[in-house]
Amino acid sequence: MSSREEILNRLRGNVRETYDFPDLGFRKLEFADPVAQYVETTVTTAGARVFEIKPTDDLNEKIREAYPDAKIIASNVPGIKADKNPDTVERAQDLEDVDVGVIKGEVACAENGCVWIPQTMKEKAVCFASETLVILVSKQNIVSNMHEAYERIKFNDYGFGTFISGPSKTADIEQSLVYGAQAARGVTIFLTE
Amino acid sequence: MKIGLFVPCYVDALYPEVGVAAYKLLCSLGLDVEYPEKQTCCGQPMGNAGFQNKAEKLVENYDELFRGYDYVVAPSASCASYVRFFHEGIVKHECEAAKRTMDLVEFLHDVVKPTSLKARFPHKVSLHNSCHGVRELGLSSPSERNVPRFNKIKDLLQLVEGITVMEPERPDECCGFGGMFSVEEPAVSTRMGKDKLRRHIATGAEYITGPDSSCLMHLQGIARKNGEPIKFIHVAQILAAGL
Amino acid sequence: MSTKHSIAAEKFNQDSGRVTRHDQTFWSVRSKRDGLAYQLEEWEQLRESANLIKKHTITHLADYLEQFETNARKNGVHVHWAKDADEYNDIVMQIMREHNVKKVVKSKSMLTEECHLNDNLIRHGIDVVETDLGERILQLMEIPPSHIVMPAIHVTREEVAACFREKGIIEKHGAHAAEGLLKEGEDWRTSSDPTYLTRAARYHLRDNFMEADCGMTGGNFGIAETGDIVVCTNEGNADMSTSIPKLHIVSIGLEKIIPNYKAMGVFQRLLARHGTGQATTVYTSHFRKPRPGAEMHIILVDNGRSSILGNIEHWQTLKCMRCGACMNTCPVYRRSGGYSYTYFIPGPIGVNLGMLKDKDANYHNCSACSLCMSCDNVCPVKVDLSTQIYKWRQELDSMGHADPMKKMMSAGMQTLFEHPSLYTTALKFAPLANHVPAFMTNIKANAWCYGHTMPEFAKESFHTLWKKGKVK
């Protein structure tokens, strides 16, 4: 008997009583103004910056404003002037020296600042290895809580997605909070219409 | 209403005045109180040590002794809770007396519901919310949970004239007694007790009070060893002050 | 009357300042958790839902595992089954050999700790680099974790700095890390500033990410409906570990499977709030398919879990999602430290899991509980941790691990309490005699007096007063 069968048989044999999946219809946290709450959460607890972007704004200019010292920008978002493209770099390692990665988020969640970022590029390293991130997300796609966020998120053929709430952080040394552990040291959210 | 008074072993031996206060208090509220003499212990010391099987006969005795009462009332939250939540599991059958056993505070607050007391106690006290009172009997809302805040002990104490009731920082963290735990893990138990004592003292209270003489005994032993002058008094004694 | 835990705990308590720091560190996490709990109206409903979802899943686990496997395979992921630690290690080695792996970057996984993966990899000549900062510090210092979520929190900044110097990390990355960071006059060669040390570690780990041939992660959740593996981190190290190398191996315990996204919503909201007192981890990553040109393997590990399901008293430990909240709230853990336990998972859940793993090695931890029940009330999935510890204590005698002194005392109490007349007589002589209350008088000379003065017996017990008609 394979381990698989052995394990499954033992699991089946060891069940005495079964339980139903519960009804999750209880009332969940809702914000009157999820956009305002999202901004508040992101700025105060998640440690990211939020810039509101008007339709008339030039995104590339805004990126420059946000990160004036950036030397290498990486993005595959149409219209973003980038030095590197995560779709065309040969290896993920080629994105190691990126100063600003510009990526798109699809759903944002007001209760905890999470933004859903599905992989839309060959090398997702751009989302993590970049020194800093600019995440574009539309105000229309902000929900109150994670239950709603999970109802909304979609996968594409890349088969990876991540919720990111802000810069990488750690408190592993004597509980001192430090931003910029292994992944992006800074995150700026561009809130579009 | 016929009440059986249960005075657990260590209250009996070390703090008889707590039993006396409980008796007087219940009588003063017009209740018919009896003290069945053949009572001994709730069995918790053995159970917590890992020998609840040695408490089987005792549990049966308890049930026999107390089953005729409307309520069994004990001035000890931990013992009352052990009776109510563990006795049936020990003897593996229903126990009438166990179901109707209540801690004194719980009984007064939920059943008798007095709106006034004759007691006067013009002192500042720090309230010791003991673990089994909080987390088994529900004498107060556990700090771990998001439930409406309440404290039955405080509610009752506030009926006493002249009293000021404080609560320590970390109001329901364990004091470290835990029965046999205190002798099996003396270092941690003592440290927990010292921390608790320090927080009680920081309230500026003259007395530490609570529904469990066991926790108070533990804290008192540590206070004495460290020369702390703070005084200890069971809730029953405050509620019965002046009777 | 002492267990390995009590002996180690006494040693830990010799440094009072250390106990204070340890206690405050974890109490502050508990407090942050409470703050978030009080803000959420549906908090208790979330906990109850999590409890029920876990009960449901665990009692249908074989079905969900099959569903998970089917979906993962459809996604192009290789799925393996390991019945125990040995088979798990063999599977890992086989995958690594096929890919000629020389260096592995790894994000935190208690399961790999449980299966002693790192030792095994090293034995086979594979360079394994932990990438969670805390885990990396421990790995470099060659010491085990003392907590499952904050594994190196007991190490001081000075110790970290000394370790980084000894291992050449400061020499290689210190100057770079110090740029624009340290105060004037502060020397990067000797600084123990946490921000600076974290940055040095960042550069050190960056090198490793770039060179690694394989990334290994654990899994906080596996979603049956989609085949997703969900990994939650704050550092982004699981994502770094899987974004660069072309091979991703997931190690996940069977009990981490949950049915669907509805369930995921509940657990995502609870995990970080309980574990670290944050509304979310920075990264909640869903791995469904391998990266383009890469391979992804999931190893489903049993290692005793399917047998735990058959344990009528303790099966609910399988609900645990390893958030660490029970440790943070445990007054004994906070004052005895992670190393006082014989099992690598400390605190209330560790006491229970240790007993399920190896009773003879881990019965020592059963003393590490005052039965305060705080853990039961913080647990996001409502494992009845303290009740289970109480139950283990009842079993110690039949295992041959009962403390003889406690047994003798309990027997003494039995005799006394079963015989009211004997009890009354004993009470009468209590101020002189050695009987009542047995659990205290018997230890008069030693343990109680460690921290207490002896209580004084009343001149007349309540019994005596009653008999004499003095109770009025």
Image (cartoon, coloured by chain):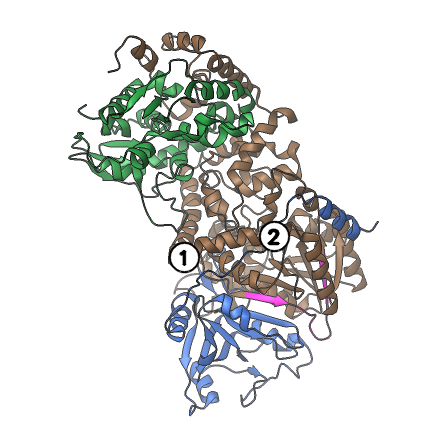
Chain colours: A blue, B green, C brown
Circle 2 sits in a helix, a strand or a loop, which is it? helix
Q: Nearer the viewer, mark 2 or mark 1?
A: 2
Q: Which range of residues does the magenta coloring cover?
A: C284-299
Chain ID, mark 1: C
Q: Reply above or below: C387 against A30.
A: above
Q: Could you tell me residue C425's position as x and y percent?
A: 40, 7
Location of mark 1 (residue): C36
Residue at 57 percent across and 83 percent down: it is: A75
Chain under disc 2: C
Q: Are marks 2 and 1 in contact (CB under 8 Å)?
A: no
Which residue type does callout 2 highlight? His
Examine the rendered structure and indicate whether residue C205 appears above or below residue B65.
below
As drawn, B126 above or below C258 = above
| Residue C292 located within the stretch drawn in magenta | yes
Q: Position of residue C219 (x, y in %)?
A: 63, 58
Q: Residue at x 46, y 80 (%)?
A: A140
Q: Which residue is mark 2?
A: C56
Q: Is residue B90 left or right of residue A3?
A: left
Q: Looking at the rendered structure, which numbered label has been put on residue C412? A: none
Q: Is residue A24 visible?
A: yes
C15 drawn magenta: no
Indicate the position of residue A11 as horizontal and vertical percent values.
71, 47
Is C94 displayed left or right of C385 in the figure? right
Asked if both marks, 2 and 1, belong to the same chain, the answer given is yes
Classify mark 1: helix, strand or loop.
helix
Q: Residues within 10 Å of mark 2 (few under 14, many from 20)?
A: many
